[in-house]
Image: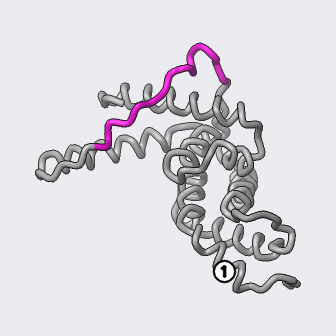
Amino acid sequence: MKFELRRPISSFESQALAHLDAAYNLARWLVRDDQVAQDMVQEAYLRALNYYDTFHGDDIRPWLLRILRNTCYTWLARNNARKDDVEFDEQRDSEYLESSFTRPETDPETLLARKEQRTQLQQAIDGLPAVYREALILREMEELSYEDIALVAEIPLGTVMSRLARARVLLRKALLQKGEKP
């Protein structure tokens, strides 16, 4: 693969490498495999480098994450990953998840309970359909704005809000089924 860049590679490095953790985090949650996630990040960064001249803007993060997202979904489609689309239901999806994992405690019993809660939360997130998992990860873990999520996922802003609402409802239900308080 031949790269013909008009912009210096050092500019790409300084902008893109700052978002490597966010890229891996999103890839890991989308493909559900550490090694594949690393491969997806590497492939997405190579694509981004190849098309760096087409990037116009100040914030490279949404652009990079969109390339990564597309790379992951292409891999999932090629590898016949399970389809986990779920229909949106306005009434059912109007609830929001409130976090209960914010109190810092230091005694061993509390630390163990929090570790167990984190494990259950990770399992619940992993059980979400990909489109909801993606929206939730981008908003709650990567702290992207709704507008940036819309850019990354190439969907309307209203769809971002719908997916987040639905993701939170599904997450709450999964946690309640495991006996957790959401």
Residue 181, how many percent across, how many down? 31, 29
> For the point 83% across and 71% down, which residue is it?
51
Q: How is the image coloured?
A: one colour
Magenta range is 88-102
Q: Quadrant of residue 35?
A: bottom right
> For the point 60% across and 42% down, which residue is it?
135
Residue 75 visible to the viewer: no
> For the point 67% across and 33% down, which residue is it?
85
From the image, give the main secondary structure of the stretch colored magenta: loop
The answer to whether 7 is drawn above or below residue 34 in the figure is below
Residue 84, how many percent across, how many down? 63, 36
Horizontal relation, residue 149 to residue 7: left or right: left
Q: From the viewer's side, name the closer residue of 76 and 20.
A: 20
The answer to whether 96 is drawn above or below residue 144 in the figure is above
The answer to whether 152 is drawn above or below residue 51 in the figure is above
Q: From the viewer's side, name the closer residue of 130 and 162.
A: 162
Q: From the viewer's side, name the closer residue of 32 and 80.
A: 32
Count of labels shown? Answer: 1
Report which residue position mark 1 lands on: 13
Horizontal relation, residue 134 to residue 34: left or right: right
User: Does 90 lie within the magenta span?
Assistant: yes
Q: Amino acid at mark 1?
A: Glu
Q: From the viewer's side, name the closer residue of 57 and 63.
A: 57
